Image (cartoon, rainbow, N blue to C red):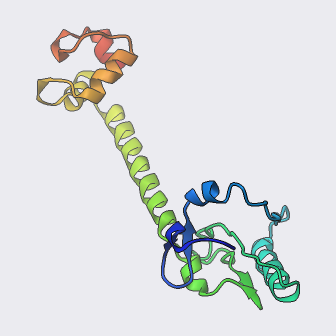
Amino acid sequence: IGVLHSELDLYGKYKGKVRLDILRRLADRKNGKYVVVAGITPTPLGEGKSTTTIGLVQALGAHMDKNVFACVRQPSQGPTFGIKGGAAGGGYAQVIPMEEFNLHLTGDIHAITAANNLLAAAIDARMFHEATQQTPALYNRLVKKGKFCELQLKRLRNLGIDKTEPTELTEDEVEGFA
């Protein structure tokens, strides 16, 4: 399909990511055909989109002698929890090695999950502290060493407060900040 080795970030023998730089290099090349396989009738085992996609690519490549590839999304975590199929196809039309495909592929989904969990923990901690502390105590926990950090100064500016010393804020400004 014309992808150079320098345009690939390989993850083992069977998977990788294509760098977006390829779009500039191939900008003058005629576009190929793009087929979207979508479904709207979910079942407990999925909709069959992956099996259809992989089967279609196999048929176009083997029987019509076309230069083809499939771009499939990361599967959901459903198979990890035994809820549904793995979005890797089935029968003769499946992505192999299925275990790698179903369990994180390149690690991106793990990074997204970790970031989501970190954000959820931060929100949960903030809600806990707001619910269990009075505003002055929360303000004192937020403002360490008696001075604002750069991010806090930006928050003050966004609130329309031009003060830079923590002791200069009025009760209303402390309430708004905290």
Left or right: residue 67 versus residue 78 is right
Determine if residue 156 is in view: yes
Marker count (numbered): 0
Residue drawn at (39%, 37%), measured in percent from left and top?
A: 127
Image quadrant where residue 145 sits: top left
Residue drawn at (66%, 72%), measured in percent from left and top?
A: 2
Left or right: residue 60 versus residue 5 is right
Image quadrant where residue 101 sits: bottom right
Residue drawn at (79%, 71%), measured in percent from left and top?
A: 49
Left or right: residue 71 versus residue 125 is right
Residue drawn at (38%, 10%), measured in percent from left and top?
A: 160
The residue furthest left is: 145
**Quarter of the rendering occupied by the C terminus:** top left
Residue 54 in the image: above or below residue 24 = below
Left or right: residue 41 versus residue 166 is right
Percent x, y of residue 89: 73, 81
**Quarter of the rendering occupied by the N terminus:** bottom right
The residue furthest front is: 28
Determine if residue 134 is in view: no
Camera-side residue: 85 or 15? Answer: 15
Percent x, y of residue 7: 53, 67
The residue furthest right is: 64
Camera-side residue: 144 or 99? Answer: 99
Percent x, y of residue 117: 43, 55
Image quadrant where residue 124 sits: top left
